[in-house]
Image: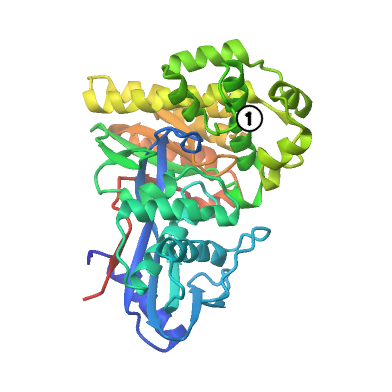
Amino acid sequence: KNQTKPKTKLQKLKEAFRGKYGQMPLFFACAPGRVNLIGEHIDYCGYAVLPMAIEQNILAAVSVSDSKTIQLANTEPKYKDFTVSVDGISIDRENPQWHYYFLCGVRGIQEHLRLSSLAGMCCMVDGTIPASSGLSSSSALVCCAGLVTMEANQKPLSKVTLAETCAKCERYIGTEGGGMDQSISFLAEEGTAKLIEFNPLRATDVRLPDGAVFVIANCCVEMNKAASSHFNMRVVECRIATKMLAKARGLDWSHLLKLGDLQKELQVSLEQMLELVEEVLHPEPYSRDEICKTLGISTEQLCENILSANTQHATDFKLYQRARHVYGEAARVLQFKAVCDSSPANAVAQLGDLMNRSHASCRDLYECSCPELDQLVDICLQAGAVGSRLTGAGWGGCTVSMVPGERLDSFLQTVREHYYVPDAHRSALEKQSLFVTRPGGGAAIFIEE
């Protein structure tokens, strides 16, 4: 329980809560957003990633009652109030609205604890993470809701259990993510980034080098993972690549879903996996027909067992490019951590180079960038960053840049002048779009003294 929340934010939330519900909140919960420094689109393939929590967060004020309803309100008027009976919680995948993310967290914890019924709650939510920016506003909302549900029903759970449960339950809204966002939200600690590994979930401190700061810059193009099929299409392409590579190596491919599981099964290095990709997969896109013929399955089996709900329409699959990105990026994460651990004299330059190669791979092989992100990365590098890359799912959202401390002021000014000022839409968003970030702490419950 920590009491170090900034007064003003809490005061405002408390007043809004009282104005809405005519009573005082019983407790508060917060869950931070995150920036992923390196390791994009590989958590759902089973590989380690390297994020840190940011100070922007989701904050909720909560009271508990025996009303048998959950009442949700948001300090931001465009997010509408929502009330649901504790026995009538349902989540509409076709329509990813803010309250459904909250209900994902509620339902995930309820199912994990096998609670036949839930305490009634009044919640007022306030967020400082820009939406659809690639900084995990939606996952932070799910995590905050999970934490609130745990506390309201007085059932203590460990941070690891909360993280795993909240990672699973985001699938209710149709996003097949890998668990990085929920894990860092719960397992973050102030002053350190984390290497997050999966199965079993664990987090290891990564000390970032002195002398450089990380700057987040939003390209101001929004991307909503649950509302578009790009994201799940990549998950599916990686799944099919896994099966095609396994088949070529004579393995039982039917139970293999992740590129990381395939490497474990073959017991070879990432370098050897990259060689296997070169040897087995061709750079031209695969048709449904070729995939079905190679695996010896029908189109119906492909649709039923391999494609996800919102990728049923897909006809072309870039298996070679996606697999090459994943194995290359997984190796870069480990190199990034090794540089941080050994802190050589040129650590900052080495880490910058890894970030730049990560962006090139996201852009060219994984194709999850967009023209605005590429332009912003170029401007950041020209402005003095040693490394710059998209962060989060991509297709919009934010870049993260590593900037030597002594260049910070001129960096910020140059990025402002070249990316934000010339465009009215970006200019209006600049205040919350360009900021220095330091590793923040994880999710917490607190009671105001």
> 370 or 29, which is in the foreground?
29
Q: Nearer the viewer, residue 411 or 12?
A: 12
Point out residue 369 in the picture as x, y percentages from the top left corner: 58, 34
Relative vertical location of residue 239 with respect to residue 52 in this rendering, above or below: above
Drawn side of residue 18 relative to residue 208, left or right: right
Residue 283 higher or lower than 148, as above or below = above
Residue 357, visible in the rendered structure: no
Q: Residues within 10 Å of mark 1 (few under 14, many from 20)?
A: many
Q: Position of residue 416 (x, y in %)?
A: 47, 42
Tell me: 255 left or right of 60: right
Does 7 sit above or below residue 341? below
User: Closest to the observer: 123 or 387?
Assistant: 123
**Residue 401 appears anywhere in the view:** yes
Residue at 76% in and 29% down: 288
- Kind of residue sitting beneath label 1: Ile
Question: Could you tell me residue 67's position as x and y percent?
Answer: 46, 86
In the displayed structure image, the side of residue 375 where residue 106 appears, left or right: left
The residue identified by callout 1 is 240
Q: Give the residue displayed 63% in from the left and 16% down from the top.
A: 281
